[in-house]
């Protein structure tokens, strides 16, 4: 099955028109020495029922679905309204190209314009782009952007930043003159502001601060931003759990110059890590350095409103090696899903959803902290994740819980050796009271 | 036709489209105390479910799409996106799996990754693949980083990357992002890399040659072995942009052409939907020498199980979170399994047949700068129509009136006024003929009535849009004071 639409008669007549004696003839310009003189060694093609059976068999080997899971750490299970699935699967949204021809792409362009608006409203920034790959690469793009904006070369990264984000930033900045400096976290789990102050200097391009941070703690972003601004460095907010924007103060109102993050929580399935949705917003003054596509408003020949991709002189297809970024294909369809999600949730729904996450996480934290020997590792206020310190070997406890297909959270020691026997627990609106109580009783049992 | 408002313009406080279940834990008054809370989300919409559904359904109808018709975008490979692939990606064992779950719970996902890597290795003749890059451009960046890391280990990362003048704009941009200077290589009279120019440019400062093959003219670089030999003999690497791999599957393999690194675009060759600009996936394949540098973690087999290996001392590191655009990978896997070896070869054969059918049908009517045989695409120009003051943009916009999406025009830069046409293998002959007839009709109109082209399109939801005004006075978001301009 190859999804071709030609009959044998078509093929014959078209070969004639093309002036070729055979299919083989069409490839006459290829030298024989590099031709493949055998069939590719691949399994025989499958019919649709065979394909589905084969893939169901493979997918069936992922038994995650039977788990009671409290895994988060940058990938969250949230409610997805039916409308998101139904509308985003329309062929007119799935199968168009990038809207370079605006007259036949007004649907996609208006969706992007609405997405940009929603991101601006949530982050408190003036402008936003059409999307980036994911939260980690978006954070990396933000560091490069900060350097372009002020020419400075030191980047302060909190130790409480998502480890994948940190490593992605390391990869993206390796072949530049940028220097990465780590800022410690304090007893509350938030940025150690004294450490931040001592490391800030006049070479500092930007301070990154994740809110809520990797440990779930709601950082005092304003304090960090004020310190950064005191040295004329930029304050960059990184949001890995975008639902938090529904209730926590917009980073833009706390002094952020650039806000970047991961939009997976807005209507995208866990999907074993992707595709997700990077987003970025900034102040209007920084427009020329903002990477990625942007949809803008204009008028047509008859004066009617329409949308076009604009300011493309920042982009690779015009500027080539002088572009603000090499990004071309982005995550447009994921941004569409986020737009449908956010408009369906609406103002009141999103606030309620965000509040619900705080309530549930708080209930979970209190319930779990009652288990003898279990302590919250940090004292800071959390959004929907928190770190628990266990009294003994985490591996043994985890094995006990896994026997019941319970995944209590992400083990932290591998990325943070100082957090031995600590686990990052994520609780969303999807967890019922019963789920949380079951985790507590199982933990109690495992520790007995 | 009614104009579809922005959602913000129909919003009214008190309306809702979604409700959460009742809170099943005791609500505590003080539980939000001490948080930096926002009063409201200024301007955020309040609408009903009907309004949301109609809004997006109407917006969808303002789009052209592969599901609606022919999309002759050169180098973009806008082929049909099989519906069964979407169903495959929605299987809960793929779509509802957390990326950080322990290995015992994610065997199916790891198998999909491993299997896809193996299939891509066989199709391209490369030794190892990473599926982490989220798009072609990120694949290019990873490829450049791999080369740089290897050269650094050899003692000198070098300074320059060579890129032919026919290349896509992401190539120089990606090389630059990796810290390399870019030097352009000229094309010869046949549209291929000028070997003499390459010979001169290929100094010990050169890290790599980035080559698209077949190139953006649709022309196969027949001297590829000589080119590879030249680059290798001077210590450089040969990078192949696999954007045009749709011409070659089952015909020849980059690995057999001594390519060192290649990126593929799963959203081109392997049928995953473009989604209005993404998500794509840009897997990178390498020869053995570069495999230790691939981004991690990598999937490996151990004792009959699949595991994630994180400890990779020579890896360039991560380029994003988790493991890439996994569900896009699943769609490509479904496609490769459906086609098999025979299907993939037929895919490339018919893609080349369709392109040559169009080329022969329009030759003489539109100017063809290079007479060299072409594979999956052909590049005409507006040279003949320019005599009547008509540009490629006018031709493109007029095509919209005929119900067809315009071809690619922004490159290759070596063909001024380019009309780059790639039909792909999935188009029915009837659709190709509609396009050919439309192009012929437009050529006639260019001679007889050029004004109708200059003011095209005439029948779309909006007429030609003022892009200059959009850039001069950027309005990039809705605000309360935004007024809809009155219809003219």
Image (cartoon, coloured by chain):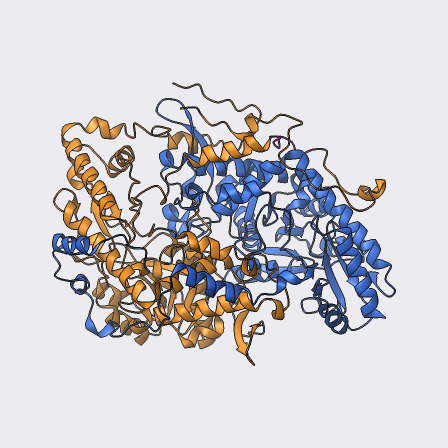
Q: Main secondary structure of the magenta part?
A: loop
Magenta part of the chain: B40-46
Percent coordinates x, y for residue A197 in the rendering: 73, 53
Q: Chain B takes which shade in the image? A: orange
* Quadrant housing residue B102: bottom right
Q: Is residue A439 magenta?
A: no
Residue shown at the point (51%, 52%) measured from the top left: A133
Vertical position of residue B466 compared to residue A394: above or below: above
Percent coordinates x, y for residue B404 in the rendering: 29, 39
Percent coordinates x, y for residue A411 in the rendering: 70, 66
Q: Nearer the viewer, residue A112 or B209?
A: A112
Residue B5 shows in this picture: yes
Vertical position of residue A176 compared to residue A306: above or below: below
Percent coordinates x, y for residue A335 in the rendering: 52, 44
Residue B129 shows in this picture: no
Q: Nearer the viewer, residue A338 or B152?
A: A338
Quadrant occupied by the N terminus of chain B: top left
Q: Nearer the viewer, residue A434 or A346?
A: A434
Rendered blue, the chain in question is: A
Looking at the rendered structure, the number of numbered marks drawn on it comes to 0
């Amino acid at each position: 099955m190859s999804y071709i639409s030609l009959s044998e008669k078509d093929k014959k007549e078209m070969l004639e028109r093309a002036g070729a004696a055979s299919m083989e003839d069409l490839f006459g310009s290829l030298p024989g020495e590099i031709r493949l003189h055998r069939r590719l060694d691949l399994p025989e093609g499958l019919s649709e029922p065979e394909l589905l059976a084969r893939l169901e068999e493979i997918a069936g080997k992922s038994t995650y679905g039977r788990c009671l899971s409290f895994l988060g750490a940058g990938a969250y299970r949230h409610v997805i309204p039916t409308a998101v699935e139904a509308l985003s699967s329309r062929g007119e949204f799935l199968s168009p190209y990038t809207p370079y021809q605006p007259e036949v792409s007004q649907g996609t362009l208006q969706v992007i314009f609405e997405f940009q608006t929603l991101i601006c409203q949530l982050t408190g920034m003036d402008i936003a782009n059409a999307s980036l790959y994911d939260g980690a690469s978006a954070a990396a793009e933000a560091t490069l952007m900060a350097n372009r904006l002020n020419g400075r070369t030191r980047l302060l990264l909190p130790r409480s930043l998502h480890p994948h984000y940190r490593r992605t930033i390391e990869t993206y900045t390796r072949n530049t003159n940028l220097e990465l400096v780590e800022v410690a976290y304090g007893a509350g789990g938030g940025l150690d502001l004294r450490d931040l102050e001592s490391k800030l200097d006049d070479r500092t391009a930007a301070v990154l601060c994740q809110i809520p941070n990797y440990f779930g703690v709601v950082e005092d972003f304003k304090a960090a931003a004020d310190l950064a601004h005191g040295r004329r460095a930029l304050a960059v907010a990184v949001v890995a759990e975008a639902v938090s924007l529904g209730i926590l103060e917009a980073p833009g109102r706390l002094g952020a110059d650039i806000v970047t993050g991961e939009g997976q929580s807005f209507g995208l399935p866990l999907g074993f890590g992707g595709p997700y949705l990077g987003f970025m917003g900034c102040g209007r003054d920084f427009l020329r350095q903002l990477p990625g596509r942007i949809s803008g408003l204009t008028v047509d020949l008859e004066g009617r409103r329409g949308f076009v991709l604009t300011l493309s002189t920042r982009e690779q297809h015009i500027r080539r090696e002088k572009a603000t970024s090499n990004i071309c294909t982005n995550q447009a369809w994921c941004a569409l899903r986020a737009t449908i999600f956010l408009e369906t949730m609406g103002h009141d729904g999103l606030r309620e959803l965000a509040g619900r996450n705080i309530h549930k996480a708080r209930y979970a934290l209190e319930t779990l902290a009652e288990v003898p020997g279990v302590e919250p590792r940090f004292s800071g206020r959390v959004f929907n994740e928190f770190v628990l310190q266990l009294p003994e070997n985490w591996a043994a406890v985890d094995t006990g819980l896994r026997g019941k297909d319970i995944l209590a959270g992400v083990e932290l020691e591998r990325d943070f050796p100082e957090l031995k026997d600590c686990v990052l627990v994520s609780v969303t609106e999807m967890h019922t009271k019963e789920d949380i109580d079951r985790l507590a009783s199982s933990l109690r049992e495992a520790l007995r | 036709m009614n104009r579809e408002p922005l959602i913000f313009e129909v919003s009214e406080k008190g309306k809702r489209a979604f409700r959460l279940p009742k809170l099943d834990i005791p609500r505590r008054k003080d539980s939000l105390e001490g948080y930096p809370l926002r009063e409201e989300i200024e301007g955020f919409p309040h609408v009903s479910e009907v309004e949301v559904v109609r809004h997006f359904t109407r917006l969808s109808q303002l789009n052209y799409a592969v599901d609606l018709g022919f999309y002759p975008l050169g180098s973009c490979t806008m082929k049909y996106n099989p519906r069964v692939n979407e169903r495959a990606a929605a299987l809960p064992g793929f779509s509802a799996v957390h990326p950080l779950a322990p290995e015992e719970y994610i065997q199916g996902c790891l198998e999909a990754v491993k299997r896809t890597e193996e299939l891509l290795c066989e199709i391209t003749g490369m030794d190892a693949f990473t599926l982490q890059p989220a798009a072609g451009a990120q694949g290019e960046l990873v490829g450049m980083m791999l080369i740089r890391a290897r050269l650094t280990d050899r003692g000198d990362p070098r300074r320059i990357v060579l890129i032919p003048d026919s290349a896509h704009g992401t190539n120089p941009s990606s090389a630059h992002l990796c810290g390399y200077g870019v030097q352009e290589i000229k094309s010869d009279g046949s549209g291929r890399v000028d070997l003499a120019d390459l010979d001169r440019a290929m100094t010990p400062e050169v890290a790599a040659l980035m080559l698209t093959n077949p190139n953006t003219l649709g022309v196969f670089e027949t001297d590829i072995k000589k080119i590879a030999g030249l680059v290798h003999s001077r210590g450089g690497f040969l990078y192949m942009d696999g954007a045009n791999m749709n011409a070659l599957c089952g015909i020849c393999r980059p690995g057999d052409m001594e390519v060192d690194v290649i990126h593929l675009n799963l959203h081109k060759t392997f049928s995953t939907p473009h989604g209005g600009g993404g998500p794509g996936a840009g897997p990178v394949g390498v020869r053995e020498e570069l495999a230790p540098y691939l981004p991690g973690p990598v999937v490996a087999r151990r004792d009959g199980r699949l595991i994630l290996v994180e400890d990779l001392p020579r890896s360039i590191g991560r380029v994003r979170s988790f493991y890439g655009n996994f569900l896009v990978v699943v769609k490509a896997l479904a496609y490769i399994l459906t086609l098999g070896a025979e299907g993939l070869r037929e895919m490339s054969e018919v893609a080349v047949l369709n392109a040559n059918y169009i080329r022969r049908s329009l030759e003489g009517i539109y100017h063809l700068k290079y007479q060299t045989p072409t594979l999956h695409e052909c590049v005409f120009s507006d040279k003949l129509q320019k005599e009547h003051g008509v540009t490629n943009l006018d031709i493109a916009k007029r095509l919209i009136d005929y119900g067809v999406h315009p071809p690619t025009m922004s490159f290759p830069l070596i063909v001024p006024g380019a009309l780059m046409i790639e039909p792909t293998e999935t188009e029915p002959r009837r659709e190709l003929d509609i396009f050919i007839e439309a192009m012929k009709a437009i050529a006639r109109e260019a001679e007889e009535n050029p004004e109708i082209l200059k003011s095209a399109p005439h029948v779309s939801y909006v007429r030609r849009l003022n892009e200059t005004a959009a850039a001069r006075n950027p309005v990039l978001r809705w605000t309360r004071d935004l007024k809809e301009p009155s219809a003219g």
